[in-house]
Image (spheres, rainbow, N blue to C red):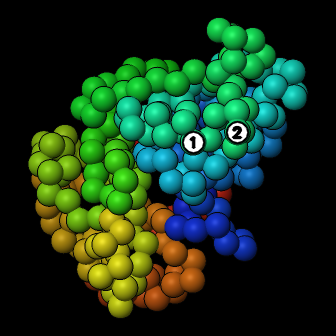
């Protein structure tokens, strides 16, 4: 299982890219930095895009990818997957022939470059040798993290954006997560804002990790607000959590 970090920033910011995690070059989780981080050849390889929620920093690459596919005249159908609310929001508010063309009907009606797939929480989609299952997380809009399992039983859980939650970890009890990719957006001084908007601080992260049974073998931190990167980094370091690492744009790791 090879994962490339296209972007792991909590905001669009000079030198930082929003969320995007590319699995084996073909399966993408969130599309915040898709067309900025991948050249045209890399974009053409993407077959499945799993979206955690419909906030702009997680979906902004979708319309530009579809446009690039058509203009290049070397396209295949891209599958965009999310829980029903996410799929409905993207179709209604982005690919609506007002903000951006409806690429489900381009180049032809019934033969569009994109297909949407609604995947209910705790239902599994199997593709390219992986089983992918969404689990609801706590955010300011309907959102889901994804449990990814390969044929050897290795498991990754990507939270997307989430605040403190107990139900998510209860549902994942006993799953033996090898790698947890979890957000920490704000420093401790902004804890109230983090909770209100459905995000985590370093202190809240520690409490979340304590809820996971059994604990994940590796923990990767994503979605730091770039304006507070050094502060959050320092606060996380003081927690002395084992097997934890802050992600960087462009990084590649294997599970």
Name above or below for residue 195 compared with residue 128.
Answer: below
Residue located beneath label 1 in the image: 93
Confirm whether residue 236 shows in the render. Answer: no
Q: Residue furthest top?
A: 110
Locate residue 7 relative to residue 154 in the image: left or right.
Answer: right
Locate residue 97 relative to residue 24 in the image: left or right.
Answer: right
Residue at (36, 48) in percent of width and height? 143
Instruction: Give the class, few, some or many, for how many residues have Cα within 10 Å of label 1's Cα (few <14, many ≥20).
Output: few
Q: Residue furthest right?
A: 72
> Of marks 2 and 1, which one's residue comes earlier in the chain?
1
Q: Position of residue 45 (x, y in %)?
A: 69, 29
Tag of residue 98: 2
Q: Identify which residue, 147 or 237, lies in the foreground.
A: 147
Tag of residue 112: none
Quadrant of the drawing holding the C terminus: top left
Name above or below for residue 28 compared with residue 231.
Answer: above
Confirm whether residue 171 shows in the render. Answer: yes
Q: Position of residue 172 (x, y in %)?
A: 18, 44
Locate residue 58 relative to residue 99 in the image: left or right.
Answer: left
Name above or below for residue 119 compared with residue 180.
Answer: above
Q: Residue furthest front?
A: 98
């Amino acid at each position: 299982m090879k994962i490339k970090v296209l972007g792991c920033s909590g905001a669009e910011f000079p030198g930082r890219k929003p969320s995007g995690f590319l699995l084996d070059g073909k399966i993408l989780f969130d599309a915040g930095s898709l067309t900025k981080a991948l050249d045209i050849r890399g974009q053409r390889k993407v077959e499945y895009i799993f979206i955690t929620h419909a906030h702009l920093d997680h979906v902004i690459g979708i319309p530009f990818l579809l446009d690039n596919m058509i203009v290049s005249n070397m396209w295949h159908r891209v599958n965009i997957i999310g829980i029903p609310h996410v799929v409905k929001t993207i179709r209604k508010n982005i690919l609506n022939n007002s903000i951006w063309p409806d690429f489900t009907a381009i180049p032809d009606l019934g033969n569009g470059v994109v297909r949407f797939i609604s995947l209910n929480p705790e239902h599994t989609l199997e593709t390219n040798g992986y089983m992918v299952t969404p689990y609801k997380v706590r955010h300011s809009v309907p959102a889901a993290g994804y449990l990814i399992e390969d044929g050897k039983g290795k498991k990754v859980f990507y939270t997307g954006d989430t605040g403190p939650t107990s139900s998510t970890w209860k549902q994942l009890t006993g799953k033996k997560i090898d790698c947890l990719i979890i957000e920490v957006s704000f420093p401790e001084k902004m804890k109230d804002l983090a909770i209100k908007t459905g995000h985590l601080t370093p202190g809240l992260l520690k409490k979340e990790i304590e809820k996971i049974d059994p604990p994940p073998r590796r923990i990767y931190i994503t979605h730091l607000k770039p304006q507070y990167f050094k502060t959050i980094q320092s606060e996380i370091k003081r927690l002395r959590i084992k097997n934890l690492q802050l992600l960087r744009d462009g990084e590649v790791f294997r599970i």
